Amino acid sequence: MFNFNGTIVSKINDAEPELVHTLKNSFSIFETLRYQNNKILFWDYHYFRMIASLRRFRFNIPKHFTFGFFENEINKLIEIEGKTTCCFLFEFQFFSDTRTTFFLINLLPSELLKVNDSKYLIDLYKENLITSGNFSNFSVTNTGLRRIAIKYAEENGLNDVILINEHKNIVETSFGTIYLVQDNKILTPSLDCGCQDFAMRGSFNNWLKKEETSFHLLEIILSPFEIQKSNEFFVLSIENGIQIITNYRKTSYNKEKSKLLFEKFIESNI
């Protein structure tokens, strides 16, 4: 089920021909949201990230593209599909011709956010590098590179790979934001490293700074050597929740602190 510029359609071909043509032939910006427990999670972060992306890539932004407008457009899909499941992912896509900006919202059923701690094979990806700086904070910037990295992981029997920038510092994985636990510190790559400024990353980081926990968050430049110096290692994403890494090369990690921290974060935000 799709919301195509305000019109609900079951197939792309049911939409207006002009919109279908634009979708197929135009540059686009995308964002993935989650609906769970009768609310859009981290909606503030998502909305402002989408608008910031449109501005940065010089899209014309209609005046009606407000916070409440998109919330209503999401609810149109929820009213139709809400009886079958309580948890969705919404894939927003914005595309434009020279005059007008259109949007497409695709609704996908999903599982609840959860802790994943099964065996997860991950390694460094060195064949292509992310360019550091804030332009790489937007998801659309390095889409092709990430697809190549995912294919590399598949071909080498890995679940995921760790992306690095031109300075050989950690950026993120193909699927989410990296966090390293070292005693009472939690380390994550700063935005200057070129990582995507995910809504879930921003929400989790702000929660850590405000919540009275025993951890101190550091958003800093991280060398790959920091991974093997850590006690725990996890990856956070809106699609999958938390993926706890138990082994990386010859290093084994604990998972207790990461698991409890994520559960407390979800409880506070849902």
Image (spheres, rainbow, N blue to C red):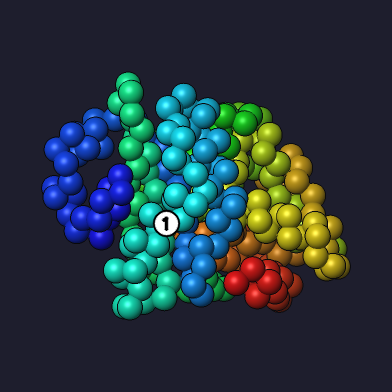
Would residue 255 be found to the left or right of residue 57 on screen?
right
Residue at coordinates 73% horizontally, 60% vertically from top-left?
A: 207
- Quadrant in which the C terminus is drawn: bottom right
For label 1, the residue is: 72
Front residue (pair 135, 63): 63
Q: Which secondary structure lies at badge 1?
A: helix
Residue at coordinates 30% horizontally, 44% vertically from top-left?
A: 5
- Give the total of numbered labels: 1
Amino acid at pointer 1? Asn
Would residue 5 be found to the left or right of residue 251 on screen?
left
Would residue 49 be found to the left or right of residue 168 on screen?
left
Picture coordinates of residue 133, whole percent (x, y): 63, 29
Relative vertical location of residue 204 with respect to residue 165 in this rendering, above or below: below
Relative vertical location of residue 61 with respect to residue 248 in this rendering, above or below: above
Front residue (pair 61, 229): 61
- Can residue 261 be seen in this snapshot? yes
Residue at coordinates 33% horizontally, 62% vertically from top-left?
A: 77
Picture coordinates of residue 177, whole percent (x, y): 60, 52
Picture coordinates of residue 40, whole percent (x, y): 51, 63
- Quadrant in which the N terminus is drawn: bottom left
